[in-house]
Image (cartoon, helix red, strand yellow):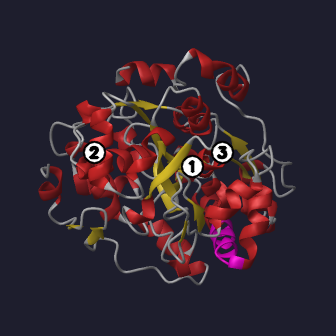
Amino acid sequence: MDRRSFLQAGALTLGAAALPAFAAACGGGGDDTSAAGAGAGGGGGNRHVKLGFIALTDCASVVMAKELGYFEQRDLDVEVLKQESWPVTRDNLLRGEIDGAHCLFGMPFSVATGIGAEQPSRDLKIAMVLNNNGQAITLSDEFAGVGYADLEGARDALAAAGTPQLAMTFPGGTHDAWLRYWLLATGSGFSAVDIQPVPPPQMVQNMTVGNIKGYCVGEPWNAVAVAQDIGFTHLATQDLWQHHPEKALVVGTRLTEETDVLKDVMGAVLEASRWLDDPDNRSAAADTLGTQSYVNASPDDIRGRLTGVYDLGGDLGEKTFEGDQMQFFRDGQANLPRRAHGIWFLTQYQRFGYLDEAPAYQELVDDLILTDLYAEVAAAEGIDVPDDDMAPFEIELDGVTFDPAHPDEEAQRP
């Protein structure tokens, strides 16, 4: 499928065997605008806000801000609305059907450069980062001999499999970036595989029926593959890039204009982020997230990886992450939307072949990331703003240091 076909289709579920569940998930309509919970009884008028989310564990700070009453305490009437896919989320943001969303950090850059939208748009802005870490690359049990983070073994197994079909969730999004970066690190070319977009909740079923042999997605859909004995965790993304940006609060034109409302939304989400990073609260959060209104998965499948204990599957045993599992606040380090990270995504678009030439790096990140607004909200909430907005950082998977002052070096790297 070419990019144009994907964008027109909105989202892809592979193979006829997977279609019934996908149709049920879509509810037969173009987008799901049913509220995920009862509307808060805050103010009316422009204090009414619609926030979208995808059924992933890392929607937790938006969901818990709702469930804990943090939006209502700030006189906000917030609806949290489940979206069926990232393309639907994009379209609803651009049309103003929702005001903001739990969203891929890379989506605004992908949409602005025309990778993830037929008509490039800079209307999607990053207000804050929602979480670091906590995604994974899952491979089918057919590849179980590869083991954890064995890049050479993965390269050889992929080559022996012909042209296996792998899945990510949105072109130019975070899962696409992690999957393609990993492929290059293994020494595999993109021609060795067939990469297709699949909505996150449909990954497991597509692997179950053999449509895909591996995928990169957020939790709990990696843990669910392990629980159902169909796949194993080959790499957690915190071992690709520790404390990488993952989901962001992305907003459309209404909230970029009504900054008083947006600042209150951000303050409530920051409050929930702090609550979530208290280890004593994580199990309760898993119970809330597991309900049908939200992630609709077993709380136990959510709980393990949310607390940092990974059953890897494939006879690999357990791996425990302490402090670098999914993080929502990290003592105020998690939530700053760093412009250096945005530049990194733009360089990867060139490495991956999405862009033929360098985009306007600094102009794009300055336009799409609401750095000053985040600093203002953080100050009001008593949160220190990190001073590493444009600092170099290391990608652990291949030991490369990225310097945002010299993006062309990364963009031209094989």
- Furthest toward the top, the residue is 16
Q: Position of residue 66 (x, y in %)?
A: 77, 59
- What residue is pinned by disc 3? 55
The residue drawn where x is 24% and y is 67% is 399
Q: Amino acid at mark 2?
A: Arg
Magenta span: 267-279
Q: CA distance from mark 3 to mark 1?
A: 13 Å
Label 1 crowd bin: few (<14), some (14–19), many (20+), radius 10 Å: many
Q: Amino acid at mark 3?
A: Ala
Sequence-wise first label, 1 or 2: 2
Residue 104 visible: no
Q: Amino acid at mark 1?
A: Asn
The residue drawn where x is 36% and y is 25% is 3
| Magenta stretch: includes residue 371 | no
The residue drawn where x is 31% and y is 50% is 153
Above or below for 325 versus 204: below
Sequence-wise first label, 3 or 2: 3
Q: Position of residue 102 (x, y in %)?
A: 59, 51
Left/right of residue 307 with respect to residue 237 in the rendered view = right
Residues under numbered marks 3 and 1 in contact, where contact means CB atoms less than 8 Å apart:
no
Label 3 crowd bin: few (<14), some (14–19), many (20+), radius 10 Å: many
- What residue is pinned by disc 1? 222
Query: Magenta region, mostly helix, strand or loop?
Result: helix
Above or below for 342 versus 384: above
- What residue is pinned by disc 2? 155
